[in-house]
Image (cartoon, rainbow, N blue to C red):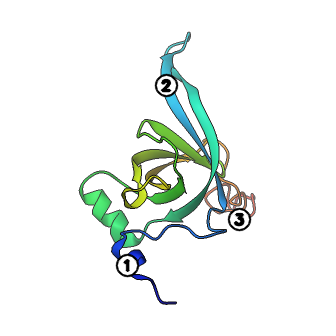
Amino acid sequence: MKRSLTEQRQTYREPEDGELDCRVEFRTRQDTPSPGGGTQPIYTSTFKTWGKFRQVSGSAYLHSMQVQETITHTVVIRYRRVTNDMEAVIDGSVYRVMRAGAMNGEKNFVYIELKELGAETPDDPPPGLSHSTFYGGYNGSAR
């Protein structure tokens, strides 16, 4: 497929129809003191949207590790106000927004770089990994 001259000048290709196929929930987290000591999170300013969710390449991950701003995934959504004090929840996993900005300088889409924090409920395995050797041996049986 040949790209037009305007597409060649842009840094990122905008998603086409059907590429925004992943449900993403964005939320702002605020830690407040809990009565028993420690902190408890309170989530405000939440919204759900469709996005194009991708894992970064190995070289991009290593380069982000060198500058101590680890980027593990990216997501592209239709233009919404997203800041770096937000979290994204995708399929039960939580990601911290590291950087967000208008894609190609236009306000059609937002390109967001994420850092994976882990499962939303740390005691539960991520979806699809209940039979993993990491979560309880071979099919849940101990050797």
Which one is earlier in the sequence, the residue at label 3 or at label 1?
A: 1
Q: Nearer the viewer, mark 3 or mark 2?
A: 2
Q: Against 25, is 113 above or below?
A: below
The kind of residue tagged 1 is Gln
Q: Nearer the viewer, residue 115 or 132?
A: 115
In the rendered structure, the answer to whether residue 83 lies left or right of residue 139 reads left
Residue labelled with disc 2: 30
Which one is earlier in the sequence, the residue at label 3 or at label 2?
A: 2
Q: Nearer the viewer, mark 3 or mark 1?
A: 1
Residue 61 location, x and y as percent? 36, 64
Which one is earlier in the sequence, the residue at label 1 or at label 2?
A: 1
Mark 1 element type = helix
Q: How many marks?
A: 3
Residue labelled with disc 3: 138
Q: Residues within 10 Å of mark 1 (few under 14, many from 20)?
A: few
Residue labelled with disc 1: 8
The kind of residue tagged 2 is Gln
Q: Residues within 10 Å of mark 3 (few under 14, many from 20)?
A: few
> Residue pushed farthest bottom?
1
Residue 10, located in which quarter of the rendered image?
bottom left
Q: Mark 1–mark 2 contact, CB under 8 Å? A: no
Residue 8 location, x and y as percent? 37, 78
The quadrant the C terminus occupies is bottom right
Q: Residues within 10 Å of mark 2 (few under 14, many from 20)?
A: few
Q: Nearer the viewer, residue 80 or 130?
A: 80
